[in-house]
Amino acid sequence: MTVQASLPLRLDSELPNSASFSACRRVARAIYLGSAPLTHAAHRGLEDRRIKLSSVMPGESPAVFGDALRRLAGAATYLYQDGARYWYSTQADGYKLAEDRAEQYKREPDKVAHELDRRLRDDLRRTGDFSRIHPMPQSGQDVPDDMDARLVVTGDRSCLQQGFRQLAEASRGKFLNHAVTRRASIATPWPF
């Protein structure tokens, strides 16, 4: 908890109030010591008031340590909370682990887009009721102008950075506009 790369130290450095008291580090230590499992304990962890009591020294404001506890609870992966009780566990909290992974994926959008493309292409090999499926065509020219029903799945790498709905609508509109203008320019005899 006092290592240079530790979360409590980083949180303390972000707020001047917390840094002057080392509030996050003191709160983390109190929770760590209070998280030791007891054989005959009805509830695990410590209540928030006991954490503040074990962290604050005479003359210091308990509100600073309450704020440090809230910040730590929102950021620490291995810190659990049940109502007013807090404890550390060796298993990561599922919600916070998912948030950490989401942040990691945001830093690697090309890797995510490549994996999505691969999975879509693998899944779209089964055509179902369609005679053919066109996964992620680059333009309307990639889809032949035939009379049979086909499924066209559009994909765009920039959907990871922009709002998906707006991007999907713009991509669909551009694709359909190109397909219609291409069809209109080709004299295709339609069976009426």
Image (cartoon, helix red, strand yellow):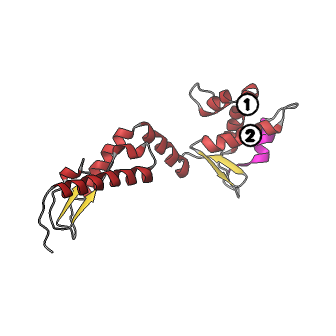
Does residue 122 appear left or right of residue 19 in this picture? Answer: left
Q: Answer yes or no: do the residues labelled 2 and 1 have beta carbons within 8 Å? A: yes
As drawn, which residue projects farthest toward the bottom? 192
Does residue 67 appear left or right of residue 174 in this picture? Answer: right
According to the picture, the residue beneath numbered tag 1 turns out to be: 18
Q: Nearer the viewer, residue 70 or 29?
A: 70
Q: Quadrant of the N terminus?
A: top right
Magenta residues (range): 45-55
| Figure quadrant of residue 40 | bottom right
Q: Position of residue 20 (x, y in %)?
A: 75, 25
Q: Nearer the viewer, residue 167 or 59?
A: 167
Residue 153 drawn above or below residue 66: below
Name the secondary structure under disc 1: helix
Q: Position of residue 54 (x, y in %)?
A: 78, 39
Q: Amino acid at mark 2?
A: Asp
Q: Position of residue 157 (x, y in %)?
A: 34, 44
According to the picture, the residue beneath numbered tag 2 turns out to be: 67
Graded by Cα atoms within 10 Å as few (under 14), some (14 to 19) or many (20 or more), the crowding at tag 1 reads: some
Q: Upstream in the sequence, badge 2 or badge 1?
A: 1
Q: Which numbered disc covers residue 181?
A: none
Name the secondary structure under disc 2: helix
Residue located at (22% from left, 56% from top): 134
Q: Amino acid at mark 1?
A: Ser
